[in-house]
């Protein structure tokens, strides 16, 4: 499939490739939609296996940001950026500054933030070249690391899924497997540990796994064991596409609810497979919207307590999606897409009528 065909199929407004030979910056910024407002989405830095994989990732992620903002009720469009390279060895101040200048050249159509491979300190460097940055430190007028809001929203979303699927208003006595122990995964486990749950953990970083075992009494599981666990909830909090043909056959859980993006390898097919298997799926861009809600509030008068209250609306949004999915026998991810698209179309129509 050609690059332009891929872009057309996803419905993007603009896709920008950037290359700076002096810093070896290779980046893609994808602007999916600006109907509801300027596109906002994090910058991800990682060593992709190919430029095509990087494009596929940024297209999917930016479209998800459009829908995430819409369903969360934010006046934002969807965008995302990727820097191709190893964040441990290829990242430099000069590279980040160059990236900031590229963002500045888009004149506010895209606002960046941190994502995998990036940190608050990196946003500070980018900010020296452009003001179109969120997720900066409090000393620079930002709110710092947004991962606590992402993990809190995911925790709230898990409670909603348990309420709907298991008819329980608490998590006591339930079992959960958290895959991925980054900032969000670790903070999510901290919330879950207060609920008297059995917590299984999986990550490539053995130190993080050992920390969870000693601090929270978590149980380590290998990659091979992860999907065959007889548990209540599977919570993917790292890489995408962990729900695929192979893992769906193995799954014994009742609920999938985690902070990772692009959880379903094949969006339509695997959403249908889950509903047919009786597994309740909390759509990723709905349950993990806490971080976006937080950095959106940076653009206005920031109030931390107000942000937490706004993040808690994820509960009601998911309950509505679950209910419609059950009533209409349509996969939850399809319902959430329909909800987002309705909001966008309404705004689009209003704009057309105003001319």
Image: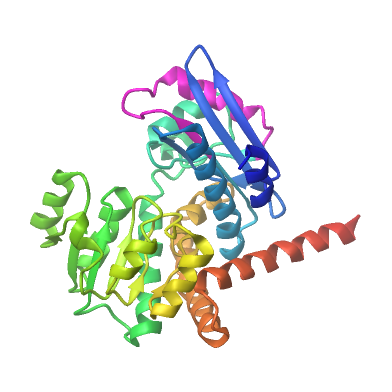
Identify the magenta region: 81-109
**Lateral position of residue 246 relative to residue 303, left or right:** left
Residue at 40% from the left image edge and 36% from the top image edge: 118
Q: Is residue 1 above or below residue 247?
A: above
The percent coordinates of residue 330 (x first, y second) are: 55, 78
Q: Let me know if residue 105 is in the magenta part.
A: yes
Q: Residue at x 12, y 62 (%)?
A: 219
Q: Quadrant of the N terminus?
A: top right
Q: Nearer the viewer, residue 239 or 170?
A: 239
Whole-percent x, y for residue 206 in the image: 14, 45
Residue 343 in picture, x, y percent from top left: 68, 66
Residue closer to the observer: 295 or 207:
207
Is residue 201 rendered to the left or right of residue 276?
left
Where 233 sits versus 46, above or below?
Answer: below
Q: Residue at x 67, y 46 (%)?
A: 12
Which quadrant would residue 185 be assigned to in this image? bottom left
Q: Residue furthest left?
A: 214
Image position of 23 (left or right of 177): right
Q: Is residue 14 above or below residue 92?
A: below
Look at the image and tell me whether residue 268 can be seen.
yes
Seen from the viewer's position, the closer of residues 292 and 256 is 256
Q: Quadrant of the C terminus?
A: bottom right
| Residue 298 position in % (x across, y down) | 53, 47
The answer to which of 347 and 276 lies nearer the viewer is 276
Residue 342 position by quadrant: bottom right
Classify residue 116 as left or right of residue 349: left
């Amino acid at each position: 499939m050609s690059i332009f065909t891929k872009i057309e199929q996803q419905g993007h407004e603009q896709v920008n490739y950037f290359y700076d030979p002096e810093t070896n910056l290779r980046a893609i910024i994808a602007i999916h939609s600006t109907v509801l407002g300027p596109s906002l989405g994090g910058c991800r830095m990682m060593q992709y296996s190919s430029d095509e994989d990087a494009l596929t990732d940024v297209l999917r992620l930016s479209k998800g940001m459009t829908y995430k903002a819409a369903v969360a009720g934010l006046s934002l469009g969807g965008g995302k950026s990727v820097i191709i390279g190893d964040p441990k060895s290829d990242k430099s101040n000069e590279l980040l500054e160059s990236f900031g200048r590229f963002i500045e050249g888009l004149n506010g159509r895209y606002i960046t933030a941190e994502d995998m491979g990036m940190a608050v300190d990196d946003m500070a460097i980018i900010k020296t070249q452009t003001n179109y940055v969120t997720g900066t430190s409090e000393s620079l007028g930002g709110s710092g690391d947004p991962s606590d809001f992402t993990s809190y929203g995911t925790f709230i979303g898990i409670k909603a899924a348990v309420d709907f699927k298991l008819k329980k208003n608490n998590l006591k006595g339930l079992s959960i497997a958290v895959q991925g122990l980054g900032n969000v995964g670790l903070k999510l486990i901290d919330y879950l540990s207060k609920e008297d749950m059995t917590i299984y953990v999986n990550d490539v970083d053995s130190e993080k796994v050992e920390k969870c075992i000693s601090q929270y009494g978590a149980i380590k599981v290998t990659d091979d064991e992860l999907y065959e666990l007889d548990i209540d909830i599977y919570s993917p909090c790292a890489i995408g596409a962990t729900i695929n043909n192979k893992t769906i056959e193995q799954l014994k859980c009742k609920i999938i609810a985690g902070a990772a993006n692009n959880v379903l390898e094949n969006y339509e097919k695997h959403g249908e497979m889950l509903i047919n298997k009786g597994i309740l799926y909390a759509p990723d861009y709905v349950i993990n919207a806490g971080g976006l809600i937080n950095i959106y509030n940076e653009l206005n008068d920031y109030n931390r307590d107000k942000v937490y209250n706004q993040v808690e609306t994820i509960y009601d949004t998911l309950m509505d999606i679950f209910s419609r999915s059950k009533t209409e026998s349509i996969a939850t991810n399809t319902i959430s897409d329909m909800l987002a698209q309705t909001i966008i179309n309404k705004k689009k129509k209003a704009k057309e009528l105003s001319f």
